Amino acid sequence: MSKLGGLGARLHRGEVGYDFIGNRKIWYGLSILITITAIVALAVRGLNMGIEFQGGAVFTTPKSDVSVSQAQEFAEEASGHDAIVQKLGNGSLRIQVGGLDTDKSDQVRAELSKDLNVPEAKIAAELVGPSWGEQIATKAWTGLGVFMILVVIYLAIAFEWRMAVAALVALIHDLTITVGIYSLVGFEVTVGTVIGLLTILGYSLYDTVVVFDSLKEQTKDITKQTRFTYSELANRSINGTLVRSINTTVVALLPVAGLLFIGGGVLGAGMLNDISLSLFVGLAAGAYSSIFIATPLVADLKEREPSIKALRKRIMAKRASAAAKGESLDAADDLSAEAAVVGPRSGRRGTQEHRG
Amino acid sequence: MAAPKKGRRPAGGQSRPGRALALILIAMVALTGGMFWSGHTTPRLGIDLAGGTSITLKAKAEPGQDSAINPTNMNTAVGIIERRVNGLGVSEAEVQTQGDENIIVNIPRGTNEKQAREQVGTTAQLYFRPVLAVAAASPQTAPSATPSGSASPKPSASASSGAKVGEKSATPTATASPQGRALTEALKAPSPTPTASASSSAKPKATGTPQATPKPDPATAALQQKFATLNCLDPKARAAAGQGVKSSEPTVACGKNAIGQWEKYLLGPAEVDGRDVDKAKAGLDQRTGQWIVDMEFTDAGSKKFQSITSKLSQQTEPQNQFAIVLDGEVVSAPRVQTTLSASAQISGSFNQQSAQDLGNVLSYGALPLAFQTQSVDTVTAALGGDQLQAGLIAGAIGLGLVIIYLVAYYRGLSLIAILSLAVSALLTYVLMALLGPAIGFALNLPAVCGAIVAIGITADSFIVYFERIRDELREGRTLRPAVERAWPRARRTILVSDFVSFLAAAVLFIVTVGKVQGFAFTLGLTTLLDIVVVFLFTKPVMTLLARTKFFGNGHKWSGLDPKRLGAKPPLRRTRRAHAPVDAKEA
């Protein structure tokens, strides 16, 4: 761990750093590739919409000796519709019957109770009319739209429009990837999934905002110096917040992993699992996009601004003339030279403080 | 969301951590005390965790009647459904609107759960029953206790229109005692048992309590007894009175009269039912300027209505009335003045509201709107318990993993983070417990998920702050100034990012429905608490601990060891001057 702390120190001083901005084309390319894959997958395979979006019933029985195939037979006989039966972690059965309307499902529940020989009161049932999922989906889309508009306005005011645009692109990117993964793997889309997806909205932006905040601070007086271009500073702020980004992502993913493990391991299926699965995918995508997509995009947009363009020209000219004179004014060289001097001295100081 | 001004010097409140700590301590003690005092020491559990049935109904707009789905009608519907469900003896069923067009009915596990489920979506039972007797609300025996209602029922607007049914406008309490003969005869009508003989005198009794006929058949006697003992002032008795009665049998019921007092009725078998009403509408009578309700019957209904009105119009008070009974409660008991058939007008002491209410009742049966069942979620107590347990285990594991990570990475500093998380968890729990009775908050599975996810958001605030402090240390500062200098910058980042998170939660809460809403609520609540905890707890504690030797001197295990962090020596040469990266804030 202390290694990570030391890495933090070197990142802070700019001694080490990955060139996120310089290699942005690679990451853009990768993201475009993933996004296209996601869209193609969505178009070809579609999504595996759960019962909540199609209408139907899910019955959960207590632990029973009835086999999966038997239960399926019973359920199909009772309902006249296709049934999907799963055995859950705790030995109970989850029987899913599509196309069942809410009136008829009571009857099916009663019949199942007879067939499986368990009291009706012990069979949990979730009955969903076909338009309920539609309503949830519609509202979720509305929520998504309203949130995006508000957040763009907010970011445009608190930061600037370029950052708002970049954050929005990163957000859409995260959502597309998550949906794409759902389509590719064939995970079932339930209300839990929708909740998870909507949470990603907040979280993906949360992460982006922290990086932007640092970027804004670093570039506050950018035109008053001729040492670093905007892109270089953007790269430094990514590297400077990298440790935080890693820590935050790890800390956010740990509880979600707990949910996923418990939801999947103990209960077999259900809302805990659905929420955590989409969260897990989305959080990972969100961390990726705030570093590799959002910030480079801001830099790209910013470099088109006349004052920033002029700055870059000045810096390039300065560096060119310095190179011509054979001086080492290059930013990276300068910093590493300093670090070499600083290292041992700070070490001694630290030891002294311990004694004192 | 104002990003705090940069460059504000760490002065004032920031250097007085005691005050903030005292504030949050008082808040915690007060809230926890309030929780114990109110007796709600655990959060109310949602149906999916406690077991029970949750039903979602969606209002259906009739073609061209989109405006019918409005808050007023939704609330009326909620009231009616609530009465219906609770009337079945299901304890603490809860009915509430959600969004613009949904009604959620939560029925905890109870004896009548199944029946309640059947009752909920269905349109109400609406019947027209002849009135056999009317009496004051409670089974009083003392004559003096009779309400002093006017003894002379005014036939309102009687002469003006031939085709009118007069709404009973005043309480005829003094004349309320049943007239035994008619009563018994009426009761005989549906059942062929020719036993009853009139014995009770027709003389009005001041007691308001009907005398049981001496030797009626058992059913009649039971009914009379029921009528005698019925106490309409008791909501439970009121609800129970008309439940589960066949339309073909006589029954007792309660209803409010024109001046809002409860009365009890003895009613004959239903002659016309809700399906016979084609439409009904409130309107203003052009001539009298009074509010009236117009009813139109279907073909079959017209015949039945004609037969009942021809019979009733021959009768004397109170048996010339028919009661409009909705879900076992008398909503109106107009007197019949003449034989009517296809259409009728009810007049009386209506105001606009009561006329419209009655119109709604007549046209929709019960509900001012038609409803469609969207989802029914029945969770057994065992499954609910399993899910709650799984949620708690998941939360504990998540919290445990986060703590392990924080300890490994931040060492001594993690103590502050863990304490802050504990404060945050305590406040979340107490608020959830208190919000149950206060605003009907129920902890459901998505809400548990929201709380677990929030662990990450809460921990992030500390990470932002700690990393800032470490950056300051790396600049060569000693801990105490580093803690103060890092705060304004960390504070801004925390506020800005928490705002985004809260915005997402708020939008979700307002716009969405169902389970999504429960999730959004917890997320929003914990985000707000995060800010409170970071400002009032984490920062002051950090300030205090910076004064200790362990942290202040950067002990190896404090997580703030300048050597480990790779700090620069305190005074640097010229570099800061030309590097904007390290530009001072001020």
Image: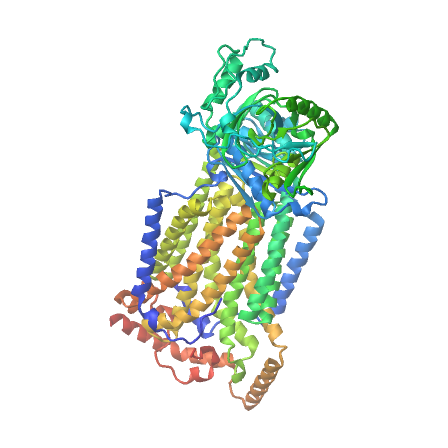
> Image quarter for residue A115?
top right
Q: Left or right: where does residue B491 sit relative to residue B352? A: left
Q: Residue at x 29, y 72 (%)?
A: A351
Q: Position of residue A178 (x, y in %)?
A: 60, 54
Hey, which residue is sitting farthest right in the picture?
B299
Q: Position of residue B119 (x, y in %)?
A: 57, 31
> Image quarter for residue B293?
top right
How has the structure been colored for display? Answer: rainbow
Viewer-proximal residue among B494 and B211: B211
Q: Position of residue B313 (x, y in %)?
A: 65, 24
Viewer-proximal residue among B200 and A65: B200
Q: Position of residue A339 (x, y in %)?
A: 42, 77
Q: Is residue A269 positioned above or below B223 on the image?
A: below
Hey, which residue is sitting farthest left in the picture?
A356
Dividing the image into 4 quarters, which one contains the C terminus of chain B?
Answer: bottom left
> Image quarter for residue B337?
top right
Viewer-proximal residue among B585 and B135: B135
Does residue B159 appear in the picture of this structure?
yes
Does residue A94 appear in the picture of this structure?
no
Q: Is residue B198 positioned above or below B68 on the image?
A: above
Q: Is residue B118 positioned above or below A3 on the image?
A: above
Q: Left or right: where does residue B437 sit relative to residue B239? A: left
Viewer-proximal residue among A278 and B461: B461
Number of numbered discs visible in the structure rendering:
0
